[in-house]
Image (cartoon, coloured by chain):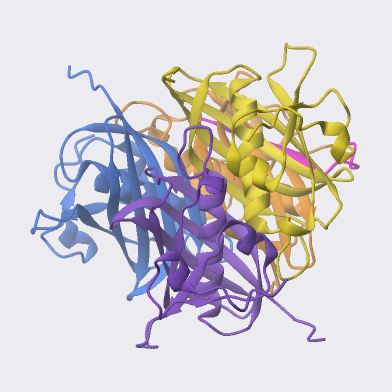
Chain colours: A purple, B yellow, C blue, D orange
Amino acid sequence: MSTKNITPQAYGIPEHFQHWEGDCAEDHNGPFFFAVDAAGQTESVTTAFRVRPENCNAHKTLHGGILMMFADYTLCIAAIGGSHEAVVTVTCNNEFIGPAFDGDLVIGRGEVTRKGGSLIFVRAVIEVDGKPVLTSSAVVKRVKRRES
Amino acid sequence: MSTKNITPQAYGIPEHFQHWEGDCAEDHNGPFFFAVDAAGQTESVTTAFRVRPENCNAHKTLHGGILMMFADYTLCIAAIGGSHEAVVTVTCNNEFIGPAFDGDLVIGRGEVTRKGGSLIFVRAVIEVDGKPVLTSSAVVKRVKRRES
Amino acid sequence: MSTKNITPQAYGIPEHFQHWEGDCAEDHNGPFFFAVDAAGQTESVTTAFRVRPENCNAHKTLHGGILMMFADYTLCIAAIGGSHEAVVTVTCNNEFIGPAFDGDLVIGRGEVTRKGGSLIFVRAVIEVDGKPVLTSSAVVKRVKRRES
Amino acid sequence: MSTKNITPQAYGIPEHFQHWEGDCAEDHNGPFFFAVDAAGQTESVTTAFRVRPENCNAHKTLHGGILMMFADYTLCIAAIGGSHEAVVTVTCNNEFIGPAFDGDLVIGRGEVTRKGGSLIFVRAVIEVDGKPVLTSSAVVKRVKRRES
């Protein structure tokens, strides 16, 4: 499956957001998008995702698992800061603050608190309409990627 | 969409496992299955899930988000012990211990550590071939369900 | 034991910081101090603590347990925003980002992400010399206090 | 200060428990004790601690910070399994399940879920009278120790 034609516009998301290629699970649920802070100084990224019916649970709200999946995406993208470095999540802690609903535009804001030689520490807030729905923190580990 | 014909056998999962009806997000990714401990004494449940290509990430392993989604399912099912009580997840903490791959049978084991009046405390270990791939803990909150 | 004469100045901490009276465990290790943001608008507090030899571990650095204790203090003070409401910690998650040493001035910054009817969601960053040493998040529960 | 004469018996703790030498912060609050499972096969340890008035908070119950400190001790001792390997805590997540009171004997049970080359994954349950008061999980990192 080619996902080259996945565009933020198709989901009502501003066009400066980019799509990360090659993750089946994310495209099967999202697609998720990200934008790296232009300033470059601060290690921060913004992510975006439009809730669809297949992301919802029996309460007709966004499933907590999908929310954690989007948080994990936000944390990892923040950790690599838009580079192509490979990382794996070691820990991911989540507080569910409020609900999100079908059709909502969900925005993630990730920040690196420390970049070590092997471990990177990251935090994120996931919001809808400027109100937090999830806070999340992670430790991710740098891994060697084998380019084929 | 009717999901009444989702059977564990179709995924190579033992037939004493049951399917929880009505969660689009879970069926879109799983389906996930559960079995309540026959003994009844101990508050424990087992859950099961067969990894498919659309659950995998760019590393060709089970996406961490899907793993957390399955952990959340396991923790909530454990919290309600097979009843139809409604709960929402308040916190969910995860340690990623090892990878799972396409085709793997993923098994979750949930245990309640305390059932309070409004909050229920739960832990889970998610395994593949008897080896832990994720440990997870949660606080879930009982909510009033409005039956329509 | 009266702790009325515990002053921030005695620990080289600015005098607008206050001491919370009546917690033996905190005074036995700290004492810890706090200051509520004057603006009042934002629900944020700052806390302060001077590391002493009896707070250190076998590595001669601030013990992680004491750091979590100070984080818990920061999170609870942030949750109540300088009021005398009683709360108990339900969950407390911590990432250890860097070390602190004997004599260091440790500063905590807490922020409320949501104040619900029974649960309050809070995050904190603990810093030394402006660099994060711990990130922490908590869910705390409001409890009825019996005034005697 | 020599702590060689800190004995479990002085705190009403069974004499097969040992004291870990050289941690000022722990001795200032505990002392804490540990026992490695005789079987040796399973990587599990038991820890013990008697609550004293100086460990209590304004609610006259064991301070959550001291409980997390004891959890951290339990998790680290479990990670090294009674050896003298040096480790530092990377993450420590805690759920506060119930209270402990002055005079209580607090018992910790730690288990390793995975020992990797650099990271060790551990979980613990802290109990009083066989009832859980805290569940905790951690990732700890092996560090090179410089023997002087």
Q: Is residue D98 visible to the viewer in this orientation of the structure?
A: no
* Residue at 68% in and 73% down: A22
Image quarter hosting the N terminus of chain A: bottom right
Quadrant of the frame with the C terminus of chain A: bottom right
Residue B122 as seen in the image, left or right of residue B35 = left
- The magenta stretch spans which residues? D39-51
Q: Position of residue C70 (x, y in %)?
A: 37, 52
**Up/down of B111 relative to D7, above or below:** above
Is C84 drawn above or below residue A28 in the view shown?
Answer: above
Q: Is residue D44 magenta?
A: yes
Residue at 40 percent of width and 58 percent of height: A106
Residue at image coords 54%, 48%: A55
In screen coordinates, is A68 left or right of B48?
Answer: left
Q: Horizontal and vertical percent for residue A65?
A: 57, 47
In the displayed structure, D79 sits above or below C87; it is below
Q: How many marks?
A: 0
Picture coordinates of residue C81, whole percent (x, y): 19, 45
Question: Is-magenta flag for residue C107?
Answer: no
Residue at 27 percent across and 43 percent down: it is: C79
Residue A122 appears in view: yes
Residue A76 screen position, x and y as percent: 56, 69
Q: Give the camera-side residue of C8 and B110.
A: B110
The quarter of the displayed image where residue B80 is located: top right
Q: Is residue D70 left or right of residue A28?
A: left
Q: Residue furthest left?
A: C39
